[in-house]
Image: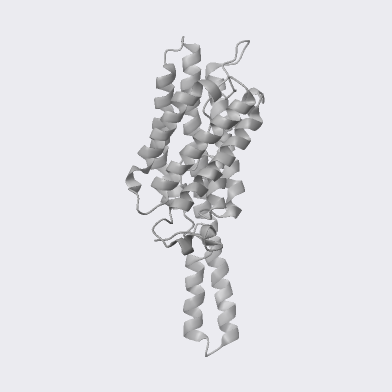
Amino acid sequence: MATTQDQIPNGTNGNHQSSGSVVVNVKDSEIQQNHQLDHSNSQTDFKESSNSVLCVPFLQKMLAEVFGTYFLIFAGCGSVVVNLSNDRVVTLPGISIVWGLVVMVMVYSVGHISGAHFNPAVTIAFATVRRFPWKQVPAYIICQVLGSTLASGTLKLIFGGGKHELFCGTLPAGSDLQAVVLEFIITFYLMFVISGVATDNRAIGELAGLAVGATVLLNVLFAGPITGASMNPARTMGPAIVYGQYKSVWVYMVAPTVGAIGGAWAYNIIRFTNKPLREITRSGSFLKSVRK
């Protein structure tokens, strides 16, 4: 659901920092002696460095996304199930607080490992503004959906099925159009906040988890009764797979994704306000990563 400084692709795609330095060092020292030997050595170093960077750290990132999404869905959807099975004792404010707290806790727990996305919409949005490598997007999405599905399955196992299953997924209370608009707005809002507090070096990065968690809390508090306040395709897809309930599922795939992309690009535009207008409007300027 959130992200920290790790999602900025300063080497997250594995090849650029470490392998690049190896190639430069070899060429600087040996190019005059034996160009062919140097080229061969640098290629070998490049492959070894690439493998070491891409394998173990990336597997750690994927595991972090699985565990993070699992705990996020287990706690958040668990509060929904407990509320339904116990005469609504948790209440809407209680559910909102649970969602906000679990987002905050997981951001601080694994944000430094994987970026704490837990959300395909967030992952895709960061990729569109070049703050996350496209080649890692499919793996992240698979891990997020897997974590959500496992958590939903755990909840179903704990609270049972039977004649009156307690569905912990998201369903529109009104029309699909109403749900699309609301999901777009709240996910836009969420992604705008994430971009501001977690990717801009001018912000107070230590408060990123708190700000993102508070945003989720607010969104669930007012949008929960209408759409379920998904803001996250994985949050909807996991319960849908486990319970076999796919009604209006397209709403929660499309609206949050488009909203997150819009929020990321909106912040990307105002991020440049300290530069001259000619730099802001220069062709391709919005597609470049901002590293201050």
**Which is more toward the observer, 206 or 153?**
206
Farthest residue toward the bottom?
33
Residue 159 visible in image: yes
Residue 3 visible in image: no
User: In the rendering, at what x and y percent does residue 147 appear?
Assistant: 55, 35
Q: Is residue 231 above or below residue 60?
A: above
User: In the rendering, at what x and y percent does residue 197 appear?
Assistant: 39, 46
**Left or right, residue 152 beside residue 205:** right
Location of the C terminus by quadrant is: bottom left
Farthest residue toward the front?
277
Count the marks. 0
**Which is more toward the observer, 223 or 115?**
223
Q: Is residue 270 above or below residue 281?
A: above
**Left or right, residue 169 beside residue 218:** right
Residue at 40%, 21% (x, y): give it. Answer: 93
**Left or right, residue 145 beside residue 99:** right
Q: How is the image coloured?
A: one colour
Q: Is residue 132 above or below residue 259?
A: below
Residue at 65%, 26% (x, y): give it. Answer: 248
Asked where in the image residue 277 lies, by quadrant, the reply is bottom left
User: In the rendering, at what x and y percent does residue 176 appear?
Assistant: 63, 26
**Which is more toward the observer, 200 or 164?**
200
User: In the rendering, at what x and y percent does residue 41 appear?
Assistant: 56, 77
